[in-house]
Image (cartoon, helix red, strand yellow):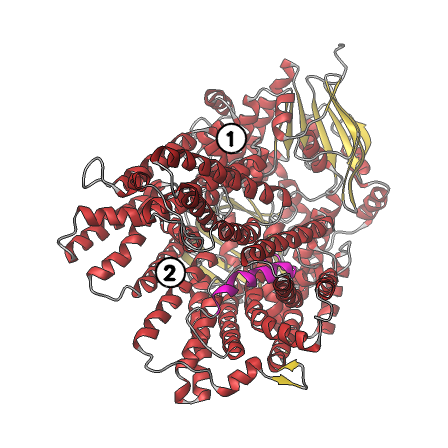
Amino acid sequence: MVLGRVALPFVPPRFVRRHGWTIGVYALLLASLIFTVAIHPTYGAFDIKSLALGALPLALAAAAQTVVVLSGGIDLTVGPLMAVTNVLAARAMLHSNFRDALLIAVLVLILGCAAGAFNGSIVVFSRVPDIVVTLAMSFVWGGVALLILEKPGGGAPLDFQNLAQETTLSPWVPNALILLIVVVAAVWIPLRGSRLGLALYAIGSDRTAAHASGVNVPLVRMLAYTLSGVFAAIGGLALTMTTGIGSPLSGSFYTLSGVATIVLGGVSLAGGKGGMLGPMAAAFILTLIPADLIFLGIDPNYGQVIQGIVIVLVVMVGGLATLRRKSA
Amino acid sequence: MSELSPLLEVSGLSKRFGPVIALRSADLSVRPGEVHALMGANGAGKSTLVKVLTGVLRPDGGTVALRGKIRVIASPAEARRAGLMSVYQDPALIPDLTVLQNLRLTGTRAEAVRRWLSELGMSDIDFGVLTRDLPPPSLRLLDLARALAAEPDVLLLDEITAALPADLTTRVFDVVGRRREKGRSVIFISHRLAEVSVFCDRATVLRDGETVGVVEPARGAEAKIVDLMLGPVAADVAQAEAQRAPIRSGDGSGKSRLEVRNLQAGSMLQDVSFTVRPGEVVGVAALEGQGQGELFDCLAGVRKPDAGQILVEGRATSFRHPYDAIHAGLVLVPADRMQALLRQRSVRENIALPLVSRLTRWGLINLRSERRRVKQAIERLQIDTRAQAQVRRLSGGNQQKVSIARWLAAGFQTLLCFDPTRGIDIGTKRQIYVLVRELAAAGSSILLFTSELAEIPLACDRVIVLFGGRVVQVLPANVADESTLLRAAHGLAAEAAG
Amino acid sequence: MVLSLLLLLLVGVLEAIRPGAVTPNWFRTTVLFAAPLGILAAGQTLVMLTGGIDLSVANVATAAAYIMASNARHGDLQAVLLGLAVGVAVGLVNGLGIAVFQAQPLIMTLGMALVVTGGLTVYSQFAVTSVPSVPGFIHTLGAGTVLGFVPVSLLLWAPIAVIIVVGLGRTGFGRLLYAIGDNAAACRLAGVRVWQVRLVNYTLCGLLSAIAGLVLAGTINTADLGLANTFLLPTVAAVVIGGTSIFGGSGNYSGTIIGALILTVLNSVLTLLDAPEPIKQILYGAIILLLATAYTRVLSDT
């Protein structure tokens, strides 16, 4: 009985095939770090800390975007939400002590969660494509940020800032890095292994099949945007920690950069494919580029160009790979 | 509750989508331990009824009662809890998740699924594989096993045999039929009358959104079912059919129009050679996945063969793009009409698509010329709609006609039809086959693959049987009956000969 | 059409808030500011019809204007051609990545936007020795008036609009844009060489973006590095409000024109309301959302 099984000419170990891109990104990160040390032999603990501080907000923006894109959507409000939570925290924490600052942080987190849920419910109930909804809402949230703080200002207690800026455990393991790992792992690891996590991938992979499989599609979509709000809020708090102030326009960079980061990290914009590990490494790679340029003595303005070229090349290569796979 | 009181009772179900009335007043009564067929032409409302029963759609009116109690089913999850599980034409499996993950998603126990799979004869599916990497028959059986593992009271099978090879079909019938013993029922949707009469206890026929009859199918009762499905038109058509003399296609002599030599592509198509002459209809018979897909893709210019030659009018050709094939006169009508049609665009735009470059003068489209050609094609095929209508609103049969009309308007030498009648109602099927014969009589060549082996003699002059990516038998159509073809398609040709 | 009514309604609201506000001069100013957006959104429309998107349009507009202005001393015509060439070049690269390498339009154009912005910054630091200036005739094009209240830029925008509308409806290329946006695979099966159409389309978008940038530079008579930055999201908004589906396959440019006008008038209404900038922004976003929702409801009922 011949069923015409799908035959593959050369079968690499399934693990490599499944996680190839992630492995590649980490290899690229390693290579970039080695390159950095090579051109700047005095690259030390301080530089690692700077790297972590710079990458933290971007990585969190990427985390927010990852959750939504995996579910088959996109969230253009990530940057503005980061700005809102940033200015809110900075304004509230200006004269408070560490303990109050923590309380404020928790409140801000809850607000971020609510904002994300709000976004999500509009996406689901208006039936307008998510790119349009989040585009419009990005204006709204941007305006809200400006309402809270017209100009950069506010502040945060030093202890709070040091949550990210210090190196408590060891000079080589900056708090920012620990913070990132703990926060992302605490949310993502339980999610990834649960049925909800599977449902997230399911609706991104094939929404109709997911519905037919009994997944509550609207609910899961809303949850995706809610989680995005949570990560964005953490990102905004991270901005408060790393910069010490609140700036209403701080978020504008992070929306699209977040998208670029996750694409570099192997998340498919079509949904259903990818994970959280890749984007984390990608955030560090993209943050390293401007630093490397300074070390090389190249005008840091080239940074944007190079980042852009890296993205374009990666995407074209990725496209080629997909083409090759399809015609096989 | 007596033995005969219905397990599932649907009364007066109605559903409309804007101006389109999908269900007018549908009734369905299924007894416990029964295999009940649901039949009807395309657009009669079968799929809508199924979707209501399984919670994908909410009805506008009517009731659904299970074991005597009226239930409102608002979602697939609720349908499942109520004991209604369905297996659709498109397996409801998530492509980017592994089999195991898919099962976890729906809360199905893996061992139960494994047990059912081995009963269906497919115990070697690797649960760690992404479902997008599984071949279609495996996907369908997996979907079926998953549904069976939920031990539903009522199992709905929507055209499950359409993409299965014949032996798997028998296996499926065996396994599913055993549910009768437990007092569980099956609703079986199929266009294949032969299967229905063998497998089912009763059949409900839908036409135009309402139930027009409940029949006990048996050998010989097929005609009655067809009558019910087609309505008053049926009698006329049947008469016309009986009186029509078989159209003589071209005598098949002369230069070859299309010749394939030792074609090889991918892992399925190994070595195929044959010739098609002008005015000839050559049928291709094969089980699922024997290389016919790759063959048609090569001929249509969708993929490049790894080895071998394609000769058109005696000249070797190489296609790098469907454009090259079309230029050489080879045009493709794929099985899945959604692959070929522009959903949101009008019928006219769809038909004129290949023509667009030819109709332009100074860049602007010559609307008059376009309108004329489109009108001709629509009339020739009796497409039941106006040219401005959006294609997605048409019934499946009419959509397929649009797909063919495109090439009538554009002109071609050889028409490659890949399973053109899959999932199409009987009336349209007949029209398509009549058209095929007419085209051949006018000098075109046709290469026709169909999974409905019984229909091959209706349209073809010769039949090529593919097995394992090779041609194992070539028969004239008049001796190509279903059982002979089936044997050959299984690779038993050598024994059958002589 | 519903959209036109909406536009008239907005103008009515404007008149109601500040009686006497709607004058020929107001009309002139409105068109003046709507024209660059409208031309920029034209490219976006073409691209979105095929189911794609171009996030580099604003940066290309800025770059074209800046390069034109910094080369003005070499001769006006040459400067303008250089500016246009920038648009064509970027469009070509976008088209190459998307059509040939099958890259996702969102991220490809995003990457190119970064390349263009960064490249422009570098260029401004090294290649420019004198203050960029806008050539005289470009200034007239962007800000001049004919017959007292008809902006010159309208004389450029109108023919472009006509060409695009007719092109979309009556030419093979236009038909193919809709077809590809609806079902690119089906087009391929029908013999259409999809990549060619896409390549030309993105190049056209780049050209239109460059034209928009030049007009904008003419309107405000300077060309700085942030010239068109705030125009990106409004182009998407204008296209969506105008009724083009973000998934491709349906829509038209006449809707986008009205969408651009609505956004511009909306801006004036909000300005006249003396609303603080944050409130303006919030209202802007909320109204776009409302319009999009209304549109989706209307479309889904048919």
The image shows residue B328, relative to residue A214, as above or below, that is below
Which residue was labeled with disc 1? B142
- Mark 2 burial class by Cα count in 10 Å: few <14, some 14-19, many 20+: many
**Residue C163: which numbered mark, if any?**
none
Q: Identify the secondary structure beneath mark 2.
A: helix
- Mark 1 burial class by Cα count in 10 Å: few <14, some 14-19, many 20+: many
**Residue A312: which numbered mark, if any?**
2
The percent position of residue B421, horizontal first and vertical second, equals 66, 46
Tell me if residue B95 can be seen: no
Q: Is residue A83 left or right of residue B449?
A: left
Q: Identify the secondary structure beneath mark 1.
A: helix
The percent position of residue B35, horizontal first and vertical second, equals 68, 23
Q: Is residue C279 left or right of residue B309?
A: right
The image shows residue B293, relative to residue B215, as above or below, that is below
Residue shown at the point (65%, 21%) measured from the top left: B82
Quarter of the image with the N terminus of chain C in it: bottom right
Residue C256 magenta-drawn?
no
Q: CA distance from mark 1 to mark 2?
A: 40 Å
Residue furthest out toward the bottom: C75
User: Of residues A204 and A138, which is closer to you in this image?
Assistant: A138
The percent position of residue A292, horizontal first and vertical second, equals 23, 58
Question: Label 1: chain?
Answer: B
Tell me if residue B102 can be seen: yes
| Three-letter amino acid code of the residue under disc 1 | Leu
| Three-letter amino acid code of the residue under disc 2 | Val
Residue B54 in which image quadrant? top right
User: Which span of residues is magenta-colored?
Assistant: C228-249
User: Of residues B254 and B282, which is closer to you in this image?
Assistant: B282
